């Protein structure tokens, strides 16, 4: 039975979305159907389609009592909105259906696992959010909450861990047909940890252990974990709050951490071997992954940063978009990301230039646009140049830029002139590897965002931009002389 709260949300979104024109949304990135979107939820392949749910407040373009929005796709680039899937309508989730995940059950049903939130009055008179893990079962459109919710609560957390910070279950089906899930938690020392639970049927859950403990290394609470096998290793993704920068890593305060290591499935022991940031731009958080039918591990994140949400004006009808789907792999010790290969099928109008030698500023015939896939290879000529820059989303007043100083091997993204009316962070610098000072950039633009894949995906920098769509110029600048190849497509 659909509750009144959910029926109202469904009715509202159906009417309200009509006020948003197609060109006012990203072209191939998923954004809120209407109102507010944050984390990806329940990213899964079910009944021959990709399902993406998301943290959703339809009634305003700012965060509010969380619902789950829903969209479905065949190729992860063209999305069709489905009716909202969950609303905060039960005594155990009346203040929000927070993030969670999904899995296909062997009997053909779709199981969602999410965090139910209720505000509880404390002795001090303050209210705090109690978080528990809940289930809902459905057919890809309608979902019914499980009668025995919540299935994990404060009885199921280690002694001293917080009942206020226990959220974002990530469920998966193991090779033996049983289930496991990881949940973000905060240990007695205030530091994040990832708890592991197992279940024979997906409904009755048992606490196993703390799979990974932060012990004060990376920020405080660890949100939105994902845990999967990749290229013979295991990867834990989590989004810690309040991180301190370390060298060129973790500059975003709230950002996504990737731990790569070995996992002994028998003893459920994860041994960390490497850590890195997942995105070196400004806007990326809380990603989830899916395994495609042909065996690719694809990740989508919320292309936003909690600290820079006010870049978009509050009166806009939608706020929040997802990143491009990215194929993951491990090379050497590191996580690599490349745009999902389906993107190549929607590219058109190829324009290419090879071996252009230039000093100063150049614009190239046919190279402009705001929905663009552009690959650049920049190399020094005889002498090393000082600085290379590419500017895009450009007109007389605006541009977003990427600049590279080969001597320091530092790549900078700057969106100061990209529609912002706020004194928030607009720049990020990333230390990139460049063999023989050669730099490869693949720049994907989609109306309100830029994602830069550096050196075949060794690093990625993502940022949202709200420059007028008429600003579609692209130019190249060099201090010195450089040599460049440009291959550009419209998307
Ligand atoms: C992360 C997060 C999650 C939580 C959700 C609430 O961005 O804080 O931990 O479930 O957002 O909307």
Image (cartoon, grey):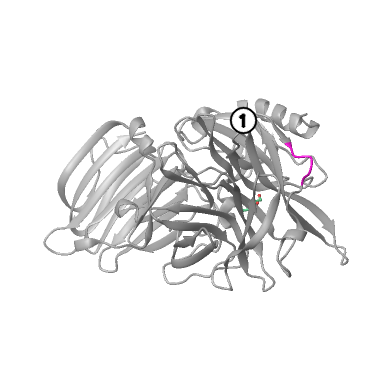
Q: Is residue 37 left or right of residue 432?
A: right
Query: How far from the left and from the top, in percent, is residue 385?
Result: 20, 62
Q: Is residue 479 left or right of residue 212?
A: left
Q: Which residues are magenta?
A: 145-149
Q: In the structure shown, which secondary structural element does the residue marked by tag 1 occupy?
A: loop
Q: Quadrant of the N terminus?
A: top right
Residue at 57% across, 69% down: 214
Task: Give the residue number, with chain letter if any, for mark 1.
Answer: 140
Magenta highlight: main SS: loop
- Is the CB–ligand 1 distance for label 1 below 8 Å? no
Position of 66 relative to 458 (above/below) = above
Query: How far from the left and from the top, in percent, is residue 55?
Result: 63, 44
Foreground residue among 389 and 73: 73
Q: Is residue 416 visible?
A: no
The answer to which quarter of the image holds residue 381 is: bottom left
Foreground residue among 305 and 389: 305
Residue at 36% across, 63% down: 333
Magenta segment: does it hold 146?
A: yes
Q: How busy is the neighbourhood of tag 1: few (under 14 within 10 Å), some, or many (20 plus)? A: some
Magenta segment: does it hold 400?
A: no
Q: Is residue 263 left or right of residue 445?
A: right
Residue at 54% across, 68% down: 218
Foreground residue among 225 and 11: 225
Residue at 66% across, 26% down: 14
Query: How far from the left and from the top, in percent, is residue 217?
Result: 54, 72
Position of 364 relative to 243 (above/below) = above
The answer to which quarter of the image holds residue 349 is: top left
Position of 483 relative to 68 (above/below) = below
């Amino acid at each position: 039975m659909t509750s009144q709260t959910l029926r109202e949300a469904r009715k509202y979104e159906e009417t309200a979305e009509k006020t948003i024109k197609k060109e006012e949304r990203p072209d191939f990135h998923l954004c809120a159907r209407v109102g507010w979107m944050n984390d990806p939820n329940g990213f899964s392949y079910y009944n021959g389609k990709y399902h993406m749910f998301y943290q959703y407040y339809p009634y305003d373009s700012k965060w509010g009592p969380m619902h789950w929005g829903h969209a479905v796709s065949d190729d992860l680039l063209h999305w069709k909105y489905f009716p909202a899937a969950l609303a905060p309508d039960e005594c155990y989730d009346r203040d929000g259906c927070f993030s969670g995940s999904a899995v296909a059950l062997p009997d053909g049903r779709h199981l969602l696992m999410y965090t139910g939130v209720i505000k509880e009055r404390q002795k001090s008179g303050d209210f705090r959010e109690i978080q528990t893990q809940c289930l809902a079962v459905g057919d890809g459109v309608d979902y019914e909450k499980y009668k025995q919710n919540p299935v994990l609560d404060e009885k199921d957390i280690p002694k001293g861990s917080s009942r206020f910070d226990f959220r974002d279950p990530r469920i998966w089906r193991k090779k033996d047909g049983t289930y496991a899930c990881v949940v973000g938690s905060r240990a007695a020392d205030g530091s994040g940890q990832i708890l592991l639970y197992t279940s024979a049927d997906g409904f009755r859950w048992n606490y196993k252990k703390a799979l990974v403990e932060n012990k004060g290394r990376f920020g405080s609470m660890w949100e939105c974990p994902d845990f999967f096998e990749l290229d013979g290793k295991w990867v834990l993704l989590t989004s810690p709050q309040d991180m301190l920068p370390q060298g060129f890593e973790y500059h975003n305060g709230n950002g996504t951490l990737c731990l790569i290591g070995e996992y002994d499935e028998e003893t459920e022991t994860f041994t960390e071997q490497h850590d890195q940031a997942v995105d070196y731009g400004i806007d990326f958080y809380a990603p989830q992954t899916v395994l495609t039918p042909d065996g690719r591990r694809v990740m989508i994140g919320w292309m936003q940063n909690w600290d820079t949400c006010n870049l978009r004006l509050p009166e806009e009808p939608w706020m929040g978009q997802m990143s491009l789907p990215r194929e993951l792999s491990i090379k050497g010790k590191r996580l690599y990301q490349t745009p999902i290969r389906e993107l190549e099928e929607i590219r058109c109008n190829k324009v290419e230039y090879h071996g252009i030698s230039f000093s100063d500023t150049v614009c190239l015939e046919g190279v402009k646009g705001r929905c663009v896939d552009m690959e650049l290879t920049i190399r020094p000529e005889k002498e090393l140049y000082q600085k290379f820059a590419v500017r895009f989303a450009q007109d007389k007043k605006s541009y977003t830029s990427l600049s590279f100083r080969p001597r320091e091997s530092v790549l900078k993204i700057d969106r100061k002139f990209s529609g912002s009316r706020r004194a928030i962070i607009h720049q990020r610098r990333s230390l990139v590897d460049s063999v023989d000072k050669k730099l490869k950039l693949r720049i994907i633009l989609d109306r309100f965002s830029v994602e830069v894949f550096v050196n075949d995906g060794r690093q990625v920098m993502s940022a949202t931009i709200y420059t007028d769509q008429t600003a579609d110029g692209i130019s190249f600048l060099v201090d010195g002389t450089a040599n460049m190849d440009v291959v550009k497509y419209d998307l």
